[in-house]
Image (spheres, rainbow, N blue to C red):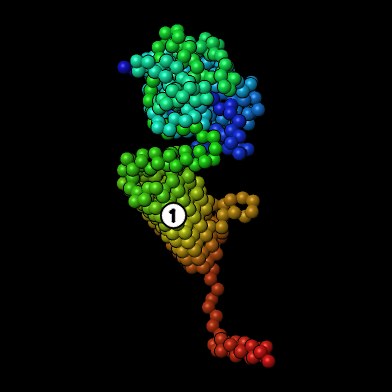
Amino acid sequence: MTDSRKFSAIILAAGKGTRMKSDLPKVLHKVAGLEMIFHVINAAQSAGVSHTTVVTSPIQEDLRNNILSKASDTPLTMAVQQEQLGTGDAVKAALPLAGNPDKALILFGDTPLMRPDVLQQMVEDSADITLLGFMTDTPDGYGRIICEDNKPIAIIEHKDADEQTRQIKLCNGGALAVNASLLPDLLNSLENNNAQSEYYLPDIVGLAHAQNISIDLVVCHQEDTMGVDTKSGLAKAEALMQSRLRQKHLDNGVTMIAPETVYFSYDTIIGSDSAIEPHCIFGIGVNIDSSVTIKGFSHLEGVRAETGVQIGPYARLRPGTHLGVNAKIGNFVETKKAHIMQDAKVNHLSYIGDAHIGEGANIGAGTITCNYDGYDKHLTEIGAGAFIGSNSSLIAPVKIGEGAYIGSSSSISGEVNADSLALTRAPLREIEGWSVKFRMKKDKSDKAEDK
């Protein structure tokens, strides 16, 4: 049965993040190539949220502008928490909720590992308030969830807990899903008589229990709730995210003989029966079809590779690279904004930038496209079946016709006709006996210096 209720998200991002020791706002630090705040926004959307409100502080104008510029296609509004009076006050700053939702999903902008399926369980739960919790043998520092008859009745922050409460291993995961019609009254009832003199959002659970409002609990893995507030925490979150991404690709039929050495971005797409050798890195925007081989120590970013492509080892493929079916990119090859068509080969030691390489063309070792004149980039066009000899310089704009041959060590500019041979190599000049005379001259000079 389809759930017809509307859900909104409130994401708290007003924290200063001073422990990150960075000029960059905490929630804009990246995990797997994506800012943490967008991991949270994307997870909420995947869980069924139709509108998101991000809460920031008055001094975070740059953060607000950054989020809005990168989320232009996302139903999203920004709210400002005028004073740092606690999480309850931060949520209050987001009211009234846009879109008049049935439920509000409250999240934190520094929790990039939150899973959409966990959030979906929360918003679709029938209770008026649904908590997120996790079990741990090391609960120090976490708020504890107090239960009666297996139902949560309160959350007690660690700093305010007595020793008996601190023995509880069921901890607060931070996220809450709340009946939107009840949220304003619950927030207005919060008090700040606690160790921090703040308005704690988790206190609405105890208030709700006192009013016989229904409360439920979703239990998740501890890592799902992990907040990042230091560079060490950021590194840990990256490691956990990479573990998830590797498992996702393995489950999708990708072969990796040493998956722990391969690093993915959040949006990497790889087809089944593709194979990735050790020590490869995938930047953002990589889309790989099935049966592609990527050999060791290769770095890809903004790459589209069709079926049967072979890449590397030690290849660097930069944004705008498109490889056609069965194309080959060999060792120590760099490409950028290059469309390399079906069965074309760039096997070794070459730079191909701002180029279109036709079907079946062969690019010899040491070939470079000279695409930049200090002001503008220019196009190199190489026709189908053309053969470019080793150590050639193609000075763009240049157009080489289909089936043409370029002699090794040539510098080519302008246009070469189809099926022609073009070369700029100087004729061989041989001077017999020159080396003997040269050595004799050097030997006499060395003996004179020794005296």
Question: Quick check: 223 above or below 199?
Answer: below
Quadrant in the picture for residue 223: top left
Q: Position of residue 96 (x, y in %)?
A: 55, 14
Q: Position of residue 406 (x, y in %)?
A: 48, 64
Quarter in which the C terminus is drawn: bottom right
- Name which residue lies at 54% across and 76% down: 427
Task: Provide the secondary structure element on which disc 1 rests.
Answer: loop
Q: Position of residue 353 (x, y in %)?
A: 52, 53
- Name which residue lies at 45% across and 61% down: 348
Q: Which residue is mark 1?
A: 297
Mark yes or no: residue 45 visible.
no
Number of numbered labels in the structure image: 1
Mark yes or no: residue 13 visible.
yes
Which one is nearer the viewer's eye here, 359 or 435?
435
Q: Position of residue 42 (x, y in %)?
A: 46, 29
**Left or right: 230 as drawn, with respect to 312:** right
- Name which residue lies at 56% across and 14% down: 191
Question: Quick check: 99 above or below 351?
Answer: above
Residue placed furthest toward the top: 211
Question: Quick check: 249 above or below 113?
Answer: below
- Name which residue lies at 61% across and 39% down: 22
Which one is nearer the viewer's eye here, 229 or 106?
229
